[in-house]
Amino acid sequence: MIEYEFPGLLNYWIVFLLMMIGLYIVIGHENLIKKIVGLNVFQVSVFVFYISMAKIKGGTAPILADGIEVYSNPLPHVLILTAIVVGVATTALGLALVVRVQESFGTIEDDEVREQEEQDG
Amino acid sequence: MNVEIVTSDLLNVATLVIMGITGLAIARIRNLFAVVMLSGIYSLMGATLYVILDAVDVAFTEAAVGAGASTVLMIGTLALTSDREKATPNARAIKGLFVCTLIFAALVYGSIDMPLYGDPSAPVHNHVAPRYLGESMGEIGLPNVVTSVLASYRGYDTMGETFVIFTAAVGVLTLIGRARRKKGGKDGGSGS
Amino acid sequence: MMMRRKMVLRVVSKLLIPFILLFALYVQWHGDFGPGGGFQAGVIFAAAFMLYGLIYGLGTLREALPSWVTRLVLSLGVLLYAGVGVVCLLLGGNFLDYDVLAHDPLHGQHYGIILVEFGVGLTVFAGIITIFCAFAGRAAADVNPHDPEETARAGDD
């Protein structure tokens, strides 16, 4: 049993706020690089959400040793560990697409790209 | 013992607040070079938080990958494009804020019956985790449970992730692997 | 290359790179006892080469690590991972069931995990280097449109 309820649900709510900052950067801006940075912010926030669910109060890192009784949950750690590396690989793919957009349109602002597309029919 | 728990909880919330401030700075600043560096700081604060939350393997990866490699790649992209962002129209910003507020409200509503932070009786901690923590020393023989789960119990997942990295590298090669032979595109190529 | 005259950067990076590589190897082979493993080791190993490329130029990096090597290593890592699974099948176990790799299941598990983590490390290392060189090669082609040799070497991937 936990001895006191701090931070309790408040912890998750702050993480939700971080996620929403990331989402706002993605949908509130036209610049493609900024959108990708926003996706990264969103991604790290989701990772933090997962990892904070794995935490047990008073536990330690899940590396087995004598004399330790309580370990935090290793399963979310595994899921997020691989997700981080896949995240950077997909980010690189997105950035490569941004480079190609810049080369074809001369801009990385989403609305300007759309304008040019409409002009060309 | 109790002092340690209180300290780690306070550090947890403090790190989250610093991450929030960094995130707001990323949203406001229009110099993309500063934005990319701040996103590196955001990742590094995330890595710090993972150490506080006992996920040492994840913290290691985040510090090497999120803060290191992806920042270098983003700066590389800035060198190929431009490092100024033009001002966001107010209408779009307000629409974005509206959508985010709605989703935030929905998430908070959904979180109300979640188990409290750090509660050992939460369902996550009582299904497969006890098996991994209790039996893996006899079945796999490695002290680092994360490695046992990653490479053995869930080795098939990890194989898929490795294939994703392979595919992403091949995709990047296909997109920008070859140097341009001629200036392509409608506007005569890049403006950098 | 702009970095040609930055003496401090050149000397310090030359001192640091061997230690970064050594640390990456430690993380790779010690991942089953402490924090670490193939994913982290691959990125750290790649970081050493990225530092070399940033300081000495992409052409020098490509002389040390030609593009055919990274492409080979990229696919070798995936093949090693899947190959361990196939060997388990041939020895009569399930796919990626390392118990059958040695007489003692615990030893089999240990061999399997070391091989599989090595495969992950190879793929991650080569993947990050490939991506980095693709971006840097584009930039070099932009900066140096009139130096065909540099462009050819840089865009060799």
Image (cartoon, helix red, strand yellow):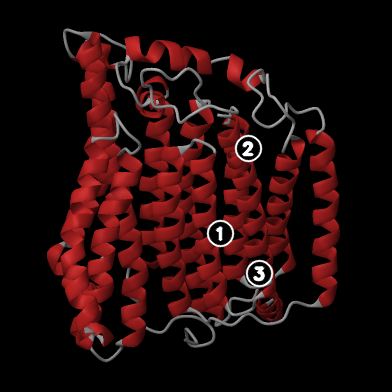
The chain identifier of the residue carrying mark 1 reads B
Q: Tag 2: residue type?
A: Val
Coordinates of residue C7 in the picture (x, y in percent) = 19, 83
Coordinates of residue B114 in the picture (x, y in percent) = 75, 28
Front residue of this view, candidates A46 and A95: A46
Q: Secondary structure at mark 3?
A: helix
Q: Residues within 10 Å of mark 3 (few under 14, many from 20)?
A: some
Q: Tag 1: residue type?
A: Tyr
Q: Do the residues marked 2 and 1 share a common chain?
A: yes
The chain identifier of the residue carrying mark 2 reads B
Front residue of this view, candidates A64 and C146: A64
- Residue at horizontal 80 percent and vertical 62 percent from the top: B96
Check disc 1 and report the residue beneath it. Answer: B42
Q: Secondary structure at mark 2?
A: helix
Check disc 2 and report the residue beneath it. Answer: B6
- Residue at horizontal 57 percent and vertical 71 percent from the top: B35
Check disc 3 and report the residue beneath it. Answer: B25
Q: Visible in this render: residue A85?
A: no
> Marks 1 and 3, Cα distance to the nearest angstrom?
10 Å
